Image (cartoon, coloured by chain):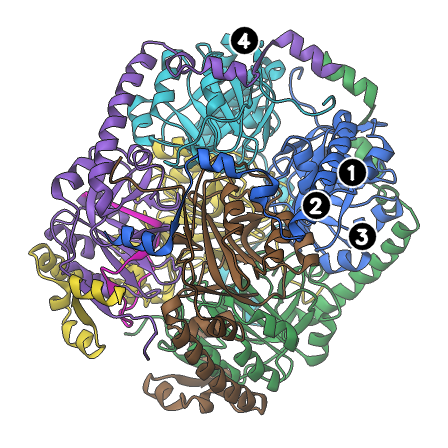
Chain colours: A yellow, B green, C blue, D brown, E cyan, F purple
Amino acid sequence: MAGLPQRGIVVTDHPRADDTVRDGLGGYGVATVHEAQGRTGLMAAGITPAWRGAHISGTAVTVSVAPCDNWMIHVAVEQCRPGDVLVVAPTSPSDAGYFGDLLATSLTARGVRGLVIDAGVRDVADLRTMGFPAWSAVVSAEGTVKETLGSVNVPIVCGGRVVEPGDVIVADDDGVVVVRRAEAAGVLAASEAREEKEARLRERYAAGELGLDVNAMRERLRRAALRYVPYDTYRKERQA
Amino acid sequence: MAGLPQRGIVVTDHPRADDTVRDGLGGYGVATVHEAQGRTGLMAAGITPAWRGAHISGTAVTVSVAPCDNWMIHVAVEQCRPGDVLVVAPTSPSDAGYFGDLLATSLTARGVRGLVIDAGVRDVADLRTMGFPAWSAVVSAEGTVKETLGSVNVPIVCGGRVVEPGDVIVADDDGVVVVRRAEAAGVLAASEAREEKEARLRERYAAGELGLDVNAMRERLRRAALRYVPYDTYRKERQA
Amino acid sequence: MAGLPQRGIVVTDHPRADDTVRDGLGGYGVATVHEAQGRTGLMAAGITPAWRGAHISGTAVTVSVAPCDNWMIHVAVEQCRPGDVLVVAPTSPSDAGYFGDLLATSLTARGVRGLVIDAGVRDVADLRTMGFPAWSAVVSAEGTVKETLGSVNVPIVCGGRVVEPGDVIVADDDGVVVVRRAEAAGVLAASEAREEKEARLRERYAAGELGLDVNAMRERLRRAALRYVPYDTYRKERQA
Amino acid sequence: MAGLPQRGIVVTDHPRADDTVRDGLGGYGVATVHEAQGRTGLMAAGITPAWRGAHISGTAVTVSVAPCDNWMIHVAVEQCRPGDVLVVAPTSPSDAGYFGDLLATSLTARGVRGLVIDAGVRDVADLRTMGFPAWSAVVSAEGTVKETLGSVNVPIVCGGRVVEPGDVIVADDDGVVVVRRAEAAGVLAASEAREEKEARLRERYAAGELGLDVNAMRERLRRAALRYVPYDTYRKERQA
Amino acid sequence: MAGLPQRGIVVTDHPRADDTVRDGLGGYGVATVHEAQGRTGLMAAGITPAWRGAHISGTAVTVSVAPCDNWMIHVAVEQCRPGDVLVVAPTSPSDAGYFGDLLATSLTARGVRGLVIDAGVRDVADLRTMGFPAWSAVVSAEGTVKETLGSVNVPIVCGGRVVEPGDVIVADDDGVVVVRRAEAAGVLAASEAREEKEARLRERYAAGELGLDVNAMRERLRRAALRYVPYDTYRKERQA
Amino acid sequence: MAGLPQRGIVVTDHPRADDTVRDGLGGYGVATVHEAQGRTGLMAAGITPAWRGAHISGTAVTVSVAPCDNWMIHVAVEQCRPGDVLVVAPTSPSDAGYFGDLLATSLTARGVRGLVIDAGVRDVADLRTMGFPAWSAVVSAEGTVKETLGSVNVPIVCGGRVVEPGDVIVADDDGVVVVRRAEAAGVLAASEAREEKEARLRERYAAGELGLDVNAMRERLRRAALRYVPYDTYRKERQA
């Protein structure tokens, strides 16, 4: 019927963010990139690493799957190129384990850098051994079926954020952030600037300087009427 | 900086779904509309009614707010017309109460039919007394500030679904579903067709007919090798 | 293969708890029945009423369904008799809406008294209007498919408790409790005894008597060294 | 051993907030009182009404109970006076049902106005019928034992907030707020002032005035560089 | 009273699954075993390892404990033999820490391979150092009492699954799966078969073959009308 | 206004628990200290380590921050001395990331031993690399603002427990426990006594002795009517 939403589409040959920009963003943490793009694009805190210590960037290949059905992930593998990250969301919430060591092996062979999924993964001990990074909503050994079509490389919502194919994904132990393809170069520049500034701050903090001085906060605190009270005075006030 | 995401925009005079279509969709439940559009667009089950018994449809005015900040809701009120529904999402998760009886009074005066928010509401006893419907992620009396700009009538993600200004929102005790503006007429027709079919089914079920017969399931179950076993036989098998 | 678990079984003509016992248990609240059977059989607090105010008892017809699949509920309806309660659990966790007003119509026509499901229901406004009671883990308009066999009238786990076909289910606003068929008469007697005792307590409490006296707790508290301290003394001790 | 924390204390004859102040605060909603005292004292949103529609104020009698043990609630009843509210917290988290219709009967006989508990209640249908208000973390029919001492009228943490005996508790459908005894008169005055201001705002909003004008926000928004963009312009910008 | 459920029973000398089968199953991951037995027996995803990297199989000794009471775990230790796994569930939900390094020392001395508990454990740093594996619903330092009887080696529900004494437990970083004693040999054979098949698949995937070809999915996708659309075409369709 | 709660206070020069006592408590695990002080002071199980393996004790510097605002943490750094632990709680729940590697650098420079926060932290990979321990309610890269005053070194509620400045904090992989300053010496002595007793128990358990004998439980179990039933007898009873 005309005017109804479509399923069962695989969009091919989508543009990707520039390789240098993509890799450059991987040099910065999720918190830095998130700040650098004006505090947007951060996925929900519930999307956590299946194992600790990975830090990747890559261009998104998106997969919309039916609940409890991972058929389209197999379809999506063919659309992946080196430097991509697979981003998967079911059309309704489901905690099954859509992805395990076999699919990780297949993606590794294609040069894919990791997986982000708003659902479950399994074989996490194998993923860690293989060094294949994955961020997921849950760990679950529960399998899925291969019965219903979804779509590949259409816009999806994952972890509460829209992901378009070709967007840059940056992920580390803090979580996952999405950078729009068209904004990636700007966000990279802003990340570099931010990191440089933070490196200088880090040095001063390490040397014992206070944030109050380094950030010139004292005058503003004074105007906001912050009051310093010795403990004994405070205690007497409370008992009065 | 060029290439960075924008905030602080109010988009005016956006197109809305047709009035007749919008009101027609309000004649069907969320479950029916969700089915009619191919099981898409349903917000997360965590978005629940602040009070039970409301059932509305309306065209979305969208609001992207900073966390713990409801300034832009005031800005959005001016953009509302009769028949609209206000849809609000913070740029990062926050359970404060962004909306209460004063804003409900203001929206009622403008003919707005309800609120959907991926955060908290307060004054829920007043909302129920006023008959102003609201669906939210939480009830919280915690207030918000008015310090940071957001945007009005840009695409947002609410309850895990993208909402564009002008889309149709249908909400009842089951939750909230979003219908794309361009697909609304088609979804209405499909909802009508589905409801007619269900009305006939309901009649037959009420008369005592079984779903097995009404839906001609017996042959398919037989092919799937469903086995009927008397209790005594089953019990002996288990103890063997 | 021998030695593997079976699916796709419908057990027919299972024994049910005695009608009089079943109906007698419905005269007591979930809390009373739970206490009367030695604090066992209470389902997890997450299984809550879809609407408030219902209070039922019935004999269980059990349904084990595949995740996101409600095919076997249709199969189960045929096995139901007046006085039954349908108890449904998916083989792995899933929050879809497996049950709505059509199935409720069909069950009502067969004299079934309600539904308990460790997953989602939808059309809850209709269920309330029809007066069909349902207890569920979630409310969700998300539909299910009809692709995979499960089983009817095998033992299942629902809300963390084993339910056998023919067991008595008692459910009210506090939740759901399961009473083993073989123990139902004993639990009914214990419930009656408990309720009589509570009625006498209630009268004495309403007349202003204290639980300390009615339950003769004072001596035991004294032996446990409970200490009464006037506020001023306590305050001085704290400041010392 | 000296220097170890104490249990098993009942503090008697603690001072309570003034009756007129206590009752006056009950004339304002939780959101208003919370705002009036500078956004402090609001209990966590997880403490919700067992039934909707109650609105109370009262002076706190506090009870610290051992997990899964309601013995001290019986002890606390004796310390209650008309106008009090019982506030209960277990020393470690537990979702059992510590309180039901019998204790509600006893408290009603003593003029107690309601219960707030950071744990479970049961018999909620009876509580609604009796009109006894209760706010709790969960509804659970699971019973508790009477084995371990706790304390009455010592400071406790309930819903993330410290409650001292004699503090004022205000509770409605939005949740629960605690007002320090020493601050109650000031908070009442501030609530009155706030409500008067809101009444004027409500009138203007109902008449169709906008928050933008009523609160003189336009100039501040302009300075913050809020930008109004017609839909067609915005759409072209996005596609560029 | 006759007909009431029993507590306070220790069942001795229960049969256990065959040693070779038990140990054989430990050679396969939870996901493999779960698939091999037809996707049944997987505990809820909330039961997670106290530390990462353990992988065990063992025969269940079951313990039903009263909430907040670990007395019966001490009783159960005596019933354990080398190769067993202790499986514990409270009769009502409770997050206290029922188990720590002392009990782990005692179980280690008896050759027990690990613990599965639908409640809390503590001393997790010590458990990791000792190499004693544990899967639990939570980590909590909160202690328990020793006041109320439970039972040992009766059927229990743990993580939503029935566990009978003598069943095989397999647990790894993905979670925990239960294999019925009578089905264990069949499940072992099926696991071996599945793993062999997966090993061949893994090799082909590693060599760059696609799941689409290896699993002959292309024809079925074509019949399901999957459509490949170049990005530019798709983009134009969306803007139309 | 008189009688309203105060914000914007920094209490200086508060007394701290004795250095030797503070460091002595760090020699015991959270579970031991919690038991030693009569099972009080344990923070909610939701406060978990950002990385595993840290074990610290320190004296509390407390910070009350506005939601989504970390301004006061900068103020608090200046009040810290070597041996302190920073304890932070927002005045209403918020999961933003209030603390990252820059603040950790600054605290390290001042000799602070770690952070406990009832909200989010970020840069957790850096914190692990730096060896800076942190316990938090969530990990989130979401930033905070610096707009609203809070207070430093006033009593706060963190993880459901009151923390006063100068109290001792002990934290390890099990969680966090608070020891009152005035009780710290007594709790240290009790911890030593408990640990000595446990060391003896551990030795006996390791040698194969049973808790039933070591703790002389058999007689008490017999009086409680614990019944030992051989499996075959039990099975026949169940089938009868």
- With B122 as the anchor, is F102 left or right in this view? left
Q: Amino acid at mark 3?
A: Leu
Marking on residue C210: none
Q: Amino acid at mark 1?
A: Leu
Q: Separation of disc 2 and disc 3 at Cα?
A: 15 Å
Marked residue chain, label 4: E
Of labels 1 and 2, the one closer to you:
1
Q: Separation of disc 3 and disc 4 at Cα?
A: 49 Å
Q: If you read the primary sequence from the N terminus, does the residue marked by circle 2 or circle 3 appear first?
A: 3
Q: Which residue is mark 3?
A: C102
Which residue is situated farthest in the left direction here?
A207
Start-end of magenta stretch: F131-156
Q: Amino acid at mark 2?
A: Val
Q: What element does badge 1 sit on?
A: helix
Marked residue chain, label 1: C
Main structural element of the magenta stretch: helix, strand or loop? loop
Q: Which residue is mark 2?
A: C145
Visible residue check, residue F70 = yes
Q: If you read the primary sequence from the N terminus, does the residue marked by circle 1 or circle 2 appear first?
A: 1
Quarter of the image where the C terminus of chain E is located = bottom right
Marks 1 and 2: same chain? Answer: yes
- The location of residue F72, given as percent across then percent down, is 24, 64
Residue at 38% from the left image edge and 75% from the top image edge: B7
Visible residue check, residue C62 = no
Q: Amino acid at mark 4?
A: Asp
Q: Separation of disc 1 and disc 3 at Cα?
A: 28 Å
Of labels 2 and 4, the one closer to you:
4
Marked residue chain, label 2: C
Marking on residue C25: 1
Q: Which residue is mark 4?
A: E18
Marks 2 and 4: same chain? Answer: no
Q: What element does badge 4 sit on?
A: loop
